Every structure is written in C-alpha cells, then in structure tokens.
Amino acid sequence: MCTSNVPPAATPSRRAFLHSATMAGAALLGGGVASGALATPAWGHGAPRSVSHPYADPTAALAALYEGNARFVQGQVMAPNRNMARLKEVAAGQKPFAAFLGCADSRVPIEIVFDQGFGDIFVTRIAGNVADPAIIGSLEFGTEVLGAQVLYVLGHTKCGAVSATMAGTEVPGQISTLYQHIRRAAKESGGDVNRAIARNVELQAEILKEASPVLARRVKAGTLVIAGGVYDLDTGKVMPVSV
C-alpha cells in the first residue's frame, strides 16, 4: 500500500526526532554501541542476545504469528504457554520471538489475538501505535537484547487516535500530542479512515527502519524482519500491510 512513496527530505525537526529516538534507544539499552555490539544492558532480567528461539528464522517466526491469529479467528486457540509452569519458567529470563508496536486500545489484546502466552512476545502499546523515542528504545531492547526475530507494527480498525487526527477537533489534556505522528497518514488517506489506519502502519514501520541503526543492522543481517498489519475488530483477523 503506497510502498513506492518516497519520504520527504528530513527537515530540522525530523532530524531532531530521529536523533532523539536513537539516543533514547541507546540510553535504554544501557550504554549505546561499542565495537559494533551493544553494551550489556542494565536491566536485570534480559536474556543474552545469543538466546535460542523455537523458530529457525524470522520468516518462520512471522508465519507462526499468522498461524496463531488464524487459530484465534477460527475459535481453535491452543492457548500455549499460559499456565503456572510456563510462568515459573520465564520468571528467570525472557526470550520472546516477536516484538510488537501496537495500539493501547483495550479491544486489541495482542497475546490473545495471536494465540501466544507468557514470554512469547514483547509488546509495546501506545495510542495510535506511533513510534516515539521511548517506544523505539523499548523495541530496540526487545530485538537487540532479547533477540526477537519479528518486529510487528499492528494497527486496528476503528482507531480513535487516527479518527481524531483526521477530525482535528479540540481534545483534552495532551491527547493532541499524538496527532503529529499520525498527521501524514491522515493527509495521504484522501479522507478514508481505513486507508489512514493502514498508511499509519506503513509510516510507523518506516520510522522504525530510519530512526534506529540498531534495528536497521538486524534487518540487514537477516536476523530481524519488520512487518505490519491491521487487526479487524469485527472479525478478529489481522490483515497484512506491506511495509
């Protein structure tokens, strides 16, 4: 969807955003990059980057996510890794095979939507599923430190943040600070909210690729795939979006 669009040249504000995102990621990971590898993170329960995962490569891991969503849609969930034994197993350390940038909407419980359990996926959620510096840093941790093989940007139908951005009406508090991250998708949608939701997924994935050398390096090495989709609130199905 509009994957041929070339992003505009960076303006000073865009450059500042990309710089702040990168710096946030480095700070979160506890020391930045040294000799091509990240310093040991300060967080106490991270698994080493050499952790093994149940899937041979990122392509297989992505396929497993879609298979889980298919089970959910068909009402044939396996509910894997959702017991006390698994809870105790991952208490000592986590090694999720996928990381998510999802919306904070209460109707989109990502572990359930993809039929996953404790320790399987590393989830960040923010209204409008936007890639701000703190989110980018968190996703760097989930991929570079914990070793997630898939980074998935998940939007959803009837997204209030996207609809509010398109309407442009006054909202209370700091809600409108989200608009700046979604405005381009709204402008390029031709007034179609569903198109804006899908375009927002594309653009947030683009930001993740551009703003983080950590993520870009893993993609280039073939140890990470960035994917995206839109979750249909009415059917439960995740519809892939080309990113």
Image: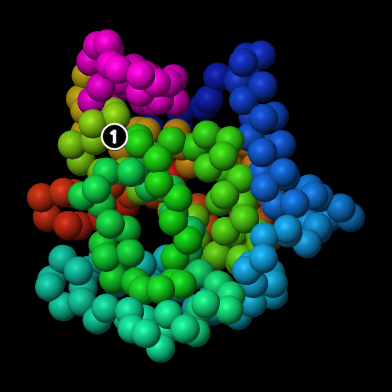
Name which quarter of the figure residue 144 lies in.
Answer: bottom right
Instruction: Classify mark 1: residues with Cα within 10 Å, few (<14), some (14-19) or many (20+).
Output: many
Give the position of the N terminus as an image quadrant: top left
- Comparing 231 with 124, the one in front is 124
Name which quarter of the figure residue 85 lies in.
Answer: bottom left
110 relative to 10, above or below: below
Image location (x, y in percent) of residue 104: 33, 43
Q: Is residue 226 left or right of residue 217?
A: left
Task: Check if residue 148 falls in the magenta segment.
Answer: no
Task: State the residue position of label 1.
Answer: 197
Residue furthest out toward the right = 35
182 relative to 95, above or below: above
Q: Which residues are magenta?
A: 163-189
Name the element at disc 1. Answer: helix
Give the position of the C terminus as an image quadrant: top left
Image location (x, y in percent) of residue 89: 49, 84
Q: Residue at x 47, y 61 (%)?
A: 122
Residue furthest out toward the bottom = 85
Q: Residue at x 35, y 23 (%)?
A: 175
